[in-house]
Structures are given as C-alpha cells and as structure tokens.
C-alpha cells in the first residue's frame, strides 16, 4: 500500500514538472516575425502558450508542443520574390505541410544585399531551417530538412493559425509603392557590379 502511494506521488510530481517545462511564450517582433521561447522576451507582444507534451488540442493560434519546439529551435524563413514560380511552389508546400514560417521578399538592391549577407545566395527561393539552408525549390530536399528539424510530416496547425505577412529582406527598407524610382545610369562608365541586369522576372543579379 505504501509503495502505491509513493508511486502515485512520484507520478504527480513528474507530471507537474512536465507541465512547467511545457510553458512557452509567443512573441511578435516589430517585423511581424513570431518567435516561441521558454523564457519571456524582453520586448514585443507576448502571449503565454500553455501546451502539454503530446497534446494536439489548441485554441487560438497555440501550437502543438512538438511543432512549437521545432519553431523555437529551428525557425523557418522563406526568401522569395514576385512572379517567381519556384517561390510560389515552395510557399504552397510549406502551407500544405503546416509549417509556421516568416517570409522575406527580395525586390530592391537593399533586399539583394541582405539576402547575400544572410544566405550567400544569388538564386531564389532560399529556405532556411534553423542553421541549414536550401537554395532553389526542391520538394524532396525541403521536406528532408524540415523533418530533420523536428517538424511533423503532416499539417497540425490550428485552423485559425495564420503566418505573418511577408516583409522586405532588408530591415527598414521602404515599401515598394513608396520607394523612389531606381536611378538611371547616364554616365558612360560600365556597370560597377553592384546590381546585375535583370533576367526575365528575376530581380537584378538573380535567377530562378
């Protein structure tokens, strides 16, 4: 009888500890990027997310524990551009699999510089999963990277969940409809290599 009481007490303590460890905090940064952490952030809009291990029931935009941990440890970012079919295919795959991700668009020379700095790539789309990177769209390669990072194979997002709106790749870059028209090089000097001529629908210096 005493053994049974001790076992029940130990089980209760373990479950209580697991409940504390499952406490996650959701914060939304100035750029709209959503982050999950087990410690309260210093700034930003914060919403505690109480999820239990293995619990797939959610309210609002709370994520299942497994998915929330993957987002926290291996955040996903998609670098894309307009009129880019591979970018559209990649975005569709992420949405269908139920992957929370932030999207950064490449439209200006500042965006190009930011992309090169962050990914060392001149091709779109680019997908980053934590510290790993995939250049160009490949369903197989993207799927492998996501699975390795701990993302579920099937969509487990709450029906009310929505990813943040895309933002410019360069922090603080002006929106396209407010930016000035690109300057025209009227000198006879050759292009200095900062921005290569556009090919098709690609931004200057990029290919799809």
Image (cartoon, helix red, strand yellow):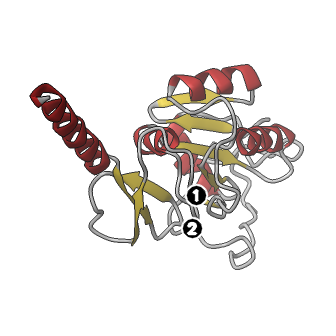
Residue 165 sits in quarter: bottom right
The answer to whether residue 192 of the structure is visible from this angle is: no
Question: Where residue 83 sits: x, y (%)?
Answer: 86, 50
Q: Which residue is labeled 2 in the image? A: 173
Secondary structure beneath dot 1 equals helix
Q: Earlier in the sequence, mark 1 or mark 2?
A: 1
Secondary structure beneath dot 2 equals loop
165 relative position to 57: left or right: right
The answer to whether residue 5 of the structure is visible from this angle is: yes
Question: Where residue 114 sits: x, y (%)?
Answer: 53, 50
Q: Estimate how packed mark 2 is, as few (under 14), some (14 to 19) or many (20 or more) residues with alpha carbons within 10 Å.
A: some
User: Could you give the CA–CA distance between mark 1 and mark 2, rounded to whole angstroms?
Assistant: 7 Å
123 relative position to 4: left or right: right
Q: Which residue is labeled 1 in the image? A: 110
Name the outermost residue toward the right. Answer: 200
Question: Where residue 174 sits: x, y (%)?
Answer: 61, 73
Name above or below for residue 154 compared with residue 49. Answer: above
At a point 65% along the width and 29% down the height, the residue shown is 153
- Is mark 1 in CB contact (under 8 Å) with mark 2? yes
Question: For the C terminus, which image quadrant?
Answer: top right
At a point 87% along the width and 47% down the height, the residue shown is 201
As rendered, which of 22 and 101 lies closer to the eye? 22
As rendered, which of 14 and 145 lies closer to the eye? 14
Name the outermost residue toward the front. Answer: 1
């Amino acid at each position: 009888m005493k053994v049974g009481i001790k076992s029940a007490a130990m089980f209760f303590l373990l479950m209580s500890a697991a409940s504390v460890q499952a406490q996650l905090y959701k914060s939304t940064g100035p750029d709209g990027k959503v982050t999950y952490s087990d410690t309260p952030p210093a700034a930003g809009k914060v919403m505690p997310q109480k999820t239990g291990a293995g619990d797939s029931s959610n309210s609002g935009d709370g994520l299942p524990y497994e998915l929330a941990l993957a987002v926290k440890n291996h955040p996903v970012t998609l670098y894309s551009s307009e009129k880019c079919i591979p970018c559209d295919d990649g975005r569709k795959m992420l949405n269908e699999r139920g992957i929370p991700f932030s999207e950064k668009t490449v439209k200006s020379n500042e965006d190009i510089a930011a992309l090169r700095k962050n990914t060392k790539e001149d091709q779109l789309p680019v997908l980053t999963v934590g510290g790993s990177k995939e250049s160009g769209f490949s369903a197989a390669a993207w799927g492998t990277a996501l699975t390795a990072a701990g993302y579920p194979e099937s969509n487990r997002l709450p029906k009310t969940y929505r990813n943040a709106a895309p933002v410019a790749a360069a922090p603080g870059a002006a929106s396209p409809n407010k930016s000035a028209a690109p300057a025209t090089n009227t000198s006879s000097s050759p292009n200095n290599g900062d921005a290569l001529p556009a090919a098709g629908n690609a931004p200057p210096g990029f290919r799809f």
